[in-house]
Amino acid sequence: MNTLGPANIRHANALACIDVFRAVDEPLSISDIAARTGLSRPTIESVISGFEVRGLVTEVEAAEAASSGGRPARRYALESTSALVAGIDAGPRNIRVLIADLRGRIIARATKVIDGAPTSDERLDIVSAVTAEALERSGVPAANLQAACIAVSGIVGESGRLIDSFAVPEWNGVSIAEHIAAGFDCVTVLENDIKLAAYAEHHMGAAQDVDNILFIQIGNRISLSQTFDGQIFQGAHRSAGEVSSLRGMHWTKTSVKGQLTWRSGETAEQVFASAATGDATALDEVTAFIQEIAPLLTTVSLVVDPARIVVGGGLSRAGDLFVDMLRKEMHRLIVLANKPDVTASPLGSTGTASGALALAFQFGSESLFGIADVTVPTFVLDRETTEIA
């Protein structure tokens, strides 16, 4: 039987106090914190003393004395910008960066479309430049960046480096995380983009109330990822969800090397938009597309039995038509009484960057707060964030 020691208790006390400070905007007295945590005043004072040393909290000007003439209570405020977090979506064609403070408030963002075919070093420089631009927009010193997560397209190995990428092969084996860590003097982690998009759903998307999901990203390609107990499922070789890696695999009869092709429009969004207006040719193509992809998606779903299936990517923004048709076909194929819900992600094009932001909080807990396992905050994304270019 495990026994909690003094270190465990101090850790739990600090976590409780951090949660209280992040939950409110106004300064808190020792009595306020005690009422919210149940901790004793000496315990809280000890925790706050440690926070003050790190610059996490500061004592604010005391309120006026009560009418009784008593000494006003000392009050403390969280310095939410004393440390910053970056979520970086280093996609093949677009770079998106979100910057958040310790409360999880997104305070800055920056994007850039990549033209041409940059070399490995040029691509790294672009990522660094967009991150620096986002930090400058935050109005907070760049030195306050303490943790970052970079999303990449491909399999990230146990070494923390990209080991197999079809989209950005020039980055295979490159020290991407180390480059950003050295440039900004912050702890940095690398992770697969689709896995991070799934992770984001638990913190700010369509899966905040469930633990296990199957995430389906549908745009120019189809990609899958899974989460269990709210965490990214990697598999034994960190290749869980890489269904497209099966030799000879074709999602549709016309797909080429995993790339989806369309007859009634240039992009999937155009085809589904036409279908939604009643265009017969587009609707026939949509119906055929769903009938082709649904059997494999349903097979994967039955293997992992998710509480919810979340559809992200370009087609999640094509209105209700696609998700409704996909749900109907998948439910038709499943003969069991219990069938998984199928819903669209609300995160738009920022899902991957948002997931990177969440993982950066988890990975960088000690750098940000001085203790491990601080809860990832609940993010609130505004319209500008979800529609980031």
Image: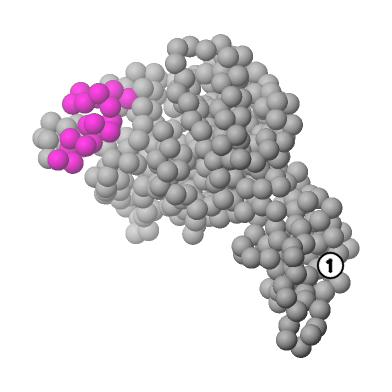
| Residue located at (56% from left, 21% from top) | 126
Please report the bounds of the magenta region as a residue range: 260-277
Instruction: State the residue lying farthest toward the bottom.
Output: 68
Q: Quadrant of the C terminus?
A: top left
- Position in image of residue 273 (x %, y %): 21, 37
- Position in image of residue 96 (x %, y %): 50, 32
- Position in image of residue 245 (x %, y %): 47, 24
- Position in image of residue 365 (x %, y %): 72, 47
Q: Quadrant of the N terminus?
A: bottom right
Front residue of 73 and 322? 73
- Side (left or right) of 382 relative to 265: right
Q: Callout 1, which amino acid?
A: Glu
Front residue of 197 and 145? 145
Looking at the image, what colour scheme do you see? one colour
Is 267 magenta? The answer is: yes
- Residue 68, compared with residue 114, is above or below; it is below
Q: Which residue is mark 1?
A: 45
Is 139 magenta? The answer is: no
- Side (left or right) of 265 relative to 162: left
Residue 307 visible, this orientation: yes
